[in-house]
Image: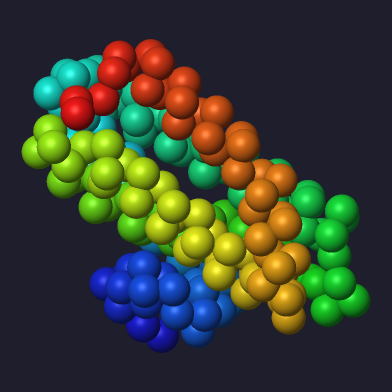
Amino acid sequence: MSSFTARLIGTSTLRAAAYEEVEADTSATRQAFFVVLLSALATGIGALGNSGWAGILWQVAVALVGWWVWAWVTCRIGTRLLPTPETVSDQGELLRVVGFSSAPGITRLLMLAPPLALPVLVISTLWMLVAMVVGVRQALDYESTLRAVAVCAIGFPIYLILLLASIVALGPWPV
């Protein structure tokens, strides 16, 4: 079993084996929670100039709710709407891979530098989406990346709505 740091690096670098390990390890749900928490804290701190301390708490709340909702939606889409004969998954597996797919969000701490805020937000969000596709492919036992893309494309608007609600609630990002 890999260390938390190795899992964080492995999932951030989009290694399928790291997602397989996280998917299979039921004790990794706490670690996934911690990854979501770190990503949310980085986002809140990165936007600290605009949002203040309340923004950090808001980001944590939105991220934790978004994590659970996106994992639930992804599980339903992947196991009921777009399953393959090999698809065997549950809410816990999706919570773990979705949680670890938020690891690139830790880079949002770089948003503290105003010129980097918008590029970091966009790049980290896209990176998280790609990580999500890799994780979903592994968790749902898909052989096709395209099917994982479809599952994420259906579920991504929910995440995007939560992200945009955060931006609106906290005011404009520093650019």
Q: Is residue 138 above or below residue 89?
A: below
Viewer-proximal residue among 111 and 39: 111
Where is residue 127 shown, x and y percent of the image? 41, 58
Image label count? 0
Q: Quadrant of the N terminus?
A: bottom left
Viewer-proximal residue among 142 and 120: 120
Horizontal relation, residue 28 to residue 51: left or right: right
| Residue positioned 62% across, 59% down in the render | 94
Where is residue 15 shown, x and y percent of the image? 45, 80
Residue 48 location, quadrant = top left
Q: Is residue 95 above or below residue 40?
A: below
> Can residue 50 be seen?
yes
Horizontal relation, residue 115 to residue 159: left or right: left
Horizontal relation, residue 40 to residue 174: left or right: right
| Residue positioned 29% across, 18% down in the render | 172
Q: Quadrant of the C terminus?
A: top left
| Residue positioned 66% across, 61% down in the render | 149
Q: Is residue 8 above or below residue 175?
A: below
Furthest-left residue in this view: 113
Where is residue 157 shown, x and y percent of the image? 62, 37
Where is residue 37 shown, x and y percent of the image? 34, 45
| Residue positioned 46% across, 59% down in the render | 101
Horizontal relation, residue 46 to residue 91: left or right: left
> Can residue 29 be seen?
no
